[in-house]
Image (cartoon, grey):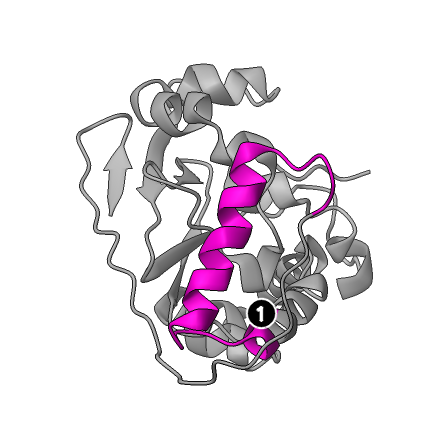
Amino acid sequence: MATTDPDAHDHHHDHDHNHGHNHSHDPIEVAEGAGEYEIMVHAIKELLIEKGVITGEDIRKTLEFMDTRTPALGAKVVARAWIDPEFKKRLLINGTAAVAEMGIPMGDAELIVVENSKDVHNVIVCTLCSCYPRTVLGLPPDWYKSRNYRSRVVVEPRAVLKEFGTELPNSVTLRTHDSNADMRYLVLPERPAGTEGWSEEQLVAIVTRDCMVGVAVPKAA
């Protein structure tokens, strides 16, 4: 669900679960001095394994997979869209299928790619928790998960962007997109002037995570 500078918004956070029934697993170790929330997370993991919802192997594989996910993957998607008009068209029509062409799975979530232009600027958020295109960008930064960002970027996006060093003319329409468990957003930034003739590798180097969240814009070095 998208809001436009800064109208009301709505979203759904339905979470589906696949159920298995393997109860055998090694105990999950909790580091000495762990805080209350870390202990709670480990306790929930133990309970889910005990109930057969997930297995210890599921957790291991997921962590190993996420370790390979970084913003560099998203930057490659953006650079490809900048130099390949046909790929860009497919990306904007069906982001999930387009990134799959590049070997990037979205799992059960749908990826929607929103394009920035000289007239429209998009920014993404998850107002309830931290839903984020992790398989494309890796783990979300702490500020994305903070209550401050989640509440303010919806009601005062220009002020929030200014704090990130991004000041946009009043003529530019700001659209805030609220991610959820089933739908994730990725911003396709506007290609900066002065990058004509650049290679895909050169373009990848100027696309940051913050550009793909929408709080920054890429700049030609």
- Left or right, 140 with respect to 183, comes to right
Q: Quadrant of the C terminus?
A: top right
Residue 90 image point, x, y percent: 43, 74
Q: Which residues are magenta?
A: 31-59
Residue 39 position by quadrant: top right
* Residue at the spot of label 1: 59
Residue 118 image point, x, y percent: 46, 37
Say which amino acid is labelled 1. Ile
Q: Which residue is located at x 46 percent, y 42 percent? A: 117
User: Magenta segment: does it hold 51?
Assistant: yes
| Residue with the most extreme bottom position | 21
Of residues 62 and 49, the one drawn nearer to the viewer in this rendering:
49
Query: Does the image show residue 107?
Result: yes
Of residues 158 and 148, the one drawn nearer to the viewer in this rendering:
148
Residue 33 position by quadrant: top right
Q: Which residue is located at x 54 percent, y 34 percent? A: 36
Q: Which residue is located at x 51 percent, y 49 percent? A: 41
Q: Which residue is located at x 61 percent, y 64 percent? A: 77
Query: Does the image show residue 215?
Result: no
Depicted 64 relative to depicted 44: above or below = below
Of residues 69 and 202, the one drawn nearer to the viewer in this rendering:
69
Of residues 49 and 88, the one drawn nearer to the viewer in this rendering:
49
Instruction: From the image, give the main secondary structure of the stretch colored magenta.
Output: helix
- Mark 1 residue element: helix
User: Magenta segment: does it hold 179?
Assistant: no
Residue 82 image point, x, y percent: 61, 60
Depicted 170 relative to depicted 207: above or below = above
- Left or right, 201 with respect to 48, comes to right
Residue 99 image point, x, y percent: 53, 73
